Amino acid sequence: MQTEFIQLTLSKDEAARVLEALAASFVVEDEIRAQQGLEAVPLPQHLARLAGLLRISDEALKKLMDLTAEGLWEYSWFVYTSEWAWFRAQHDALRQMHAKHSGVTLDHPDCRRRAEILYRKNFEKYVREIDMRNAPTGPKSQIKSGKRKSGEV
């Protein structure tokens, strides 16, 4: 089998953007493999070759991959919190609508409008419900007024 070759002319900036996209793809694939319990795969040759052409050191490439992973984490957190806030707004809107009219569903236009209003109004409140960055952890979270909950050692 013969390998086909193409010639591609890119500016250095364009090539760097391609490298960033390849790095993001590799980071996602690597994370999925880790979550599935599969072993990690080595850095793809095409990614390493492009980094070499751009004269990017292994250390700089690792830093790029770490920044890419962090950016993907931030994006994932945004999507998750947005979905949670929308779910909560729909739930609250439905509860409010049921108080006035029984039999209302989420498909009802008034319920959807109310959910949109609640989503914008209460977004920060809904996100605080799931924000674990400031949540207590470990034994301290089980302690109230210096005493553990009954039945705990």
Image: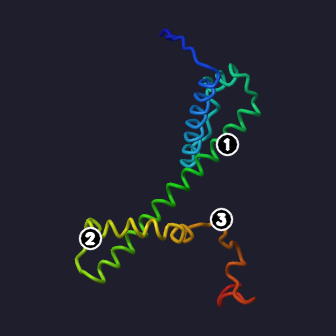
Residue visible at 70% across and 21% down in the picture: 52
Above or below: residue 85 compared with residue 34: below
In this orientation, which residue lies closer to the viewer: 56 or 119?
A: 119
The local secondary structure at tag 2 comes to: loop
Rendered residue at 29%/68% (across/down) = 106
Q: Tell me which colouring the rendered structure shows.
A: rainbow
Residue 141: x and y in percent read 68, 78
Q: At x 38% / y 65%, what residue is drawn?
A: 116
110 sits left or right of 4 in the view: left
Kind of element beneath mark 3: loop
Upstream in the sequence, badge 2 or badge 1? 1
Dots 1, 3 in contact, CB < 8 A: no
**Relative horizontal placement of residue 29, taking residue 12 as reference (left or right):** left
Task: Please state the horizontal and vertical placement of residue 61, each as a whole percent of the image.
Answer: 71, 33
* Residue 21, image x, y percentages: 57, 33
Q: Label 2, on which residue?
A: 105
Q: Position of residue 81 (x, y in %)?
A: 51, 61
Mark 3, residue position = 133
The amino acid at mark 3 is Arg
Between residues 117 and 106, which one lies in front from this camera angle?
117
* Disc 1 from disc 3: Cα separation: 19 Å
Crowding around mark 2 (Cα neighbors within 10 Å: few <14, some 14 to 19, many 20+) is some
Residue type at mark 1: give it: Leu
Task: Place residue 24 in its image quadrant.
Answer: top right
* N-terminal label among 3 and 2: 2
Q: Residue furthest top?
A: 2
Where is mark 1, residue-wise? 67
Alpha-carbon neighbours of circle 1 within 10 Å: few (<14), some, or many (≥20)?
some
